[in-house]
């Protein structure tokens, strides 16, 4: 059975979607079969993989309302073993429409039962909120990756996020675990970034990945071209760091995991 991982932080601007896209891409390049689910009405993961969200007719909205299954909705990407379940603005109405629905917290989990037998990893890009969409992501997942921005308010709101994760674990999904915490948008030239990184490591202990994702212009540019960093500029510092992070997620050392070992991608 494939592993389901939610990328989650209700605070915006933490690099959540950037992490979801690039972790999914490098996992796919490591010859894993990957499904990325865009569960954010802003649909940045969709556009970040080169799919025009305005042309989407079938989306995660239809998945949650149980109108279509995963195989009817998914879209191929430029990486042959990476598939996307896209989102569009229709998703904003899903929370309202599901308010009175029976088992509304488990809609996504039910829809992924078959997909878990097909894909090695299913990555969920959660919205920047703690509403019903995020609850669905947490109920459907085996674990959570939490991106934390390396800035002054890094820990702001994390208590609320942890309370939500614990509530879901205690009442809805007893198998839910924290996969890891990834530090993002770091500027290691500044004392502030270094202090925040140390504070996060002190707080989360061994749950924090060794790899720190820096601020990098190439990471910011790539979504505008509809490409993950592996296809836009794999040699950039951002590309190399997401490669290393994915190696950690796969429980491999970075020296044993490189693009030289990845399958060729036809652009």
Image: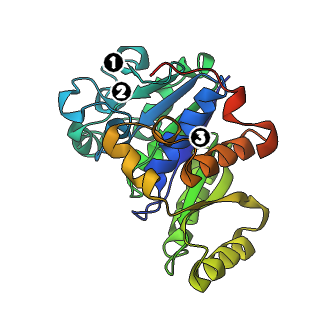
| Residue 25: percent from left, percent from top | 54, 34
- Crowding around mark 2 (Cα neighbors within 10 Å: few <14, some 14 to 19, many 20+) is many
Between disc 2 and disc 3, the foreground one is 3
From the image, which quarter does the N terminus lie in? Answer: top right
Measure how far apart labels 1 and 3 are at the Cα level. Answer: 22 Å
Question: Label 3: how many residues lie within 10 Å, few (<14), some (14-19) or many (20+)?
Answer: many
Q: Which mark is residue 5?
A: 3
SS at mark 3 in the image: strand
Which residue is pictured at 57% across the width and 41% down the height? 23
Inspect this view and state whether residue 83 appears.
yes
Residue 245 lies, in percent from the top left, at 67, 48
Question: In this rendering, does residue 253 appear at all?
Answer: no
The mark nearer the N terminus, 2 or 3, is 3
Q: Are circles 2 and 1 on residues that touch, CB within 8 Å?
A: yes
Relative to 96, residue 49 above or below:
above
- Residue that extends furthest to the left in the rendered view of this protein: 54
| Horizontal and vertical percent position of residue 159 | 56, 71
Query: Whole-percent x and y of residue 164?
Result: 53, 60
Q: Please tell me how many numbered marks the rendered image carries.
A: 3
Q: Which residue has dot 1 on it?
A: 68
Looking at the rendered structure, which numbered label has been put on residue 63?
A: 2
Residue drawn at x 65%, y 78% is 194
Q: Nearer the viewer, mark 1 or mark 3?
A: 3
């Amino acid at each position: 059975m494939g592993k389901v991982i939610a990328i989650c932080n209700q605070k915006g601007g933490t690099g959540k979607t950037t992490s979801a896209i690039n972790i999914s891409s490098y996992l796919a390049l490591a010859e894993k079969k990957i499904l990325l689910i865009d569960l954010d009405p802003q649909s940045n993961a969709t556009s970040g993989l080169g799919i025009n969200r305005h042309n989407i007719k079938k989306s995660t909205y239809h998945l949650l309302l149980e109108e279509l299954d995963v195989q009817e909705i998914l879209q191929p990407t430029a990486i042959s073993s990476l598939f996307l379940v896209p989102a569009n603005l229709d998703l904003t109405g899903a929370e309202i429409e599901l308010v009175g629905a029976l088992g509304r917290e488990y809609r996504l989990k039910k829809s992924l039962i078959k997909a878990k037998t097909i894909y090695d990893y299913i990555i969920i890009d959660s919205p920047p909120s703690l509403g019903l969409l995020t609850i669905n992501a947490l109920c459907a997942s085996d674990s959570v990756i939490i991106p934390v921005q390396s800035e002054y308010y890094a820990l702001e709101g994390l208590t609320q996020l942890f309370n939500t994760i614990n509530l879901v674990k205690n009442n809805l999904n007893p198998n839910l675990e924290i996969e890891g915490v990834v530090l993002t948008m770091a500027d290691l030239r500044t004392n502030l970034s270094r202090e925040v990184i140390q504070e996060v490591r002190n707080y989360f202990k061994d749950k924090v990945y060794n790899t720190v994702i820096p601020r990098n212009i190439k990471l910011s540019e790539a979504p505008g071209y509809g490409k993950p960093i592996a296809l836009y500029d794999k040699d950039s510092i951002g590309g190399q760091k997401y490669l290393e992070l994915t190696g950690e997620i796969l429980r491999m050392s970075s020296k044993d995991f490189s693009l030289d070992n990845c399958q060729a991608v036809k652009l």
